[in-house]
Image (tube, rainbow, N blue to C red):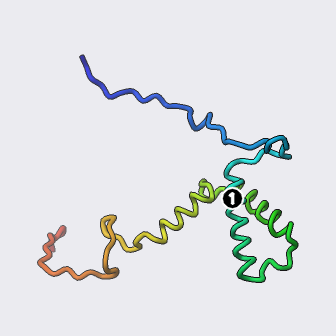
Amino acid sequence: MNEESPYVIPTYKRVWKIERTLVRLDRFKLPRPITIWQIIYFMVAFVVVLIIDKNTPLLSWLGGTLRYVFLPGAIAFYLSKVKHDGKAPHRFLLTIIKYELSPKILNRYKAAETAGKQKYEGVCTFRELYSK
């Protein structure tokens, strides 16, 4: 019997993966469906607005409803719609952090101590391709 490599059957898991949404909270129907990521982005934006509001007078000119509801809501809506390099914003941010923490000087895909010219100590031989 001839053993061949197994045949890989492609699946349509990504195609049929439906994003989870909230349509209603208890008995109250929402004006539009809200995704889980929009809720997470809203909560993170709300905490950032709270921190900025407590430490600086940057947002003091905005009213309370505008500052604590509409501003995080607008940020959450923007972050849920935008794609940076084809990635979701949180994955893009993780990629930037990973890049900033990685070594910038590499030698054979490993971190190198020094950059610039390296001095080679030893005999270097070569052959002449064209004779005179």
Residue 125 to residue 75: above or below: below
Q: Is residue 17 left or right of residue 113?
A: right
The image shows residue 74 at horizontal and vertical percentages of: 78, 61
Q: Residue furthest front?
A: 26
Q: Is residue 19 left or right of residue 112?
A: right
Residue 1 to residue 62: above or below: above
Observer-nearest of 55 and 12? 55
Observer-nearest of 89 and 73? 73
Number of marks drawn = 1
Residue 74 to residue 60: above or below: above
User: Circle 1 is placed at which residue position?
Assistant: 41
Query: Which residue is found at the position 26% from the left and 80% from the top?
Result: 118
Q: Is residue 61 left or right of residue 52?
A: right
Query: Which residue is found at the position 69% from the left and 58% from the top?
Result: 41
Report crowding for label 1: few under 14, some 14 to 19, many 20 or more residues within 10 A (C-alpha): many
Q: Amino acid at mark 1?
A: Tyr
Q: Is residue 114 left or right of residue 128?
A: right
